[in-house]
Image (cartoon, rainbow, N blue to C red):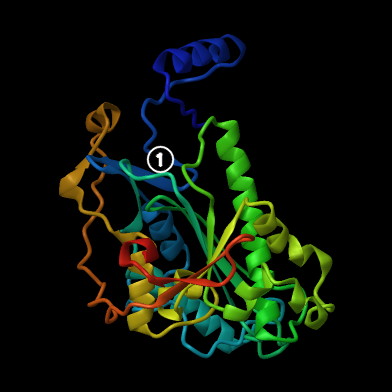
Amino acid sequence: MAITGNSSALLSTLLDELNKQFKMKDLGRLHYFLGIQIQYHDKGMFLSQQKYVEDLLAAASMSTCAPVATPLPQQLNKKMHEPTVSDFNLLKRILRYIKGTTTMGVSFARHTDSKLRVYSDSDYSGCPSTSRSTGGFCTFLGRNMISWSSKKQQTVSKSSTEAEYRAMSEATSEITWIVNLLHDLGIQLPATPELNCDNLSAVYLTANPSFHARTKHFATHYHYVREQVAFGNLIVNHIPAHFQLADIFTKSLPQRPFEYYRAKLGSHCVKPTKLKACKQDETKKPKTLQRSPATDKKALAEEKGHSMTVTLQNRFKVLGPVDKDDAT
């Protein structure tokens, strides 16, 4: 069980009360929980699954396999219930990718703002057998990615706009849940949450009722996004496709854009020389994470796009070039 809080006295009192009811042992500062390793450094902490991944590769007898740069090829036939030999080979490719990224993880910066930003995307009719689309999103609190999702949609979409709009609805539900959670924790957001989408028609649909005649086949609950915009609880932005970080969750990408988006999500290799172990770790002298050579190539050529912000009062007004910091 992991316990966290901003008051050491309150945590000590809680532990004392729990010890009266249960036989418990305080293991000190959190360093390993549910397969996740936590390493601390001056700017925050680093989360990885190196031990879990190494055990997984050993169980599959692939500890000495040759690594690959991307987890999946660009053409993938997604079959879960009736796998074939070809599908098994794709599974082995995923394990080969994991082999080359055992020391990779996600960093959480200590000093960052509390602005909530979400990137939403979909791969229209990406499944060759069912023609269903895959929706994905990633959520950032400041510079830290705190949640992400990649899920095939339950029904076939008749257009890319519908597929994007469904993905936006799922992302909006995630935003609502996170906002309520932060409110329960006593954390107030400094600004209205923003949802970023690269489909202009879907962005228009969030605030323009005249599109309703063309979208009668949409399920009612997918208009949840437009309702949140009308209430002032959400701002929807249009961003260029090359700024769409959620693209990595919806389709297989070539190596260069894959590594670019992966780096933008905050995933990188740990540097053991900059990590600080807790006192308990120092006494046990755990095995230090090995540093792997950097795999990120030079980022894609930087371009500036035009951002479009949609609110109830200010619809479809071009705000000017997208700032690089805001886009990342």
Residue 122, placed above or below residue 196: below
Residue count near mark 1 (Cα–Cα under 10 Å), binned few <14, some 14–19, many ≥20 = some
Residue at the location (84% across, 79% down)? 217
Residue plotted at (37% across, 53% down)? 143
Using residue 130 as the reference point, say whether residue 95 is left or right of it: left
State which quarter of the image contains the C terminus. bottom left
Q: Quadrant of residue 179?
A: top right
Residue receiving disc 1: 32
Q: Is residue 214 above or below residue 287?
A: below
Q: Is residue 23 visible?
A: yes
Position of residue 207 measured from the top left corner of the image (x, y, whole percent): 67, 67
Q: Nearer the viewer, residue 296 or 216?
A: 216
Residue found at x 46% / y 29%: 4
**Which residue is at a point 27% across and 76% down the rendered structure image?**
299
Task: Pick whichever, 63 or 44, lies toward us.
Answer: 44
**Closer to us: 132 or 317:** 317
Instruction: Give the side of residue 313 with respect to residue 46, left or right.
Output: right
How many numbered marks, from 0 up?
1
As drawn, is 200 to the left or to the right of 223?
left
Residue 118 versus residue 73: which sits nearer the camera? 118
Residue 293 x/y as whole percent: 20, 67
Check disc 1 and report its element: helix, strand or loop.
Answer: strand
Q: Position of residue 142 (x, y in %)?
A: 40, 50
Q: Residue furthest left?
A: 273
| Quadrant in the rendering for residue 21 | top right
What is the x, y in percent for residue 61? 43, 69
Mark 1: amino acid: Tyr
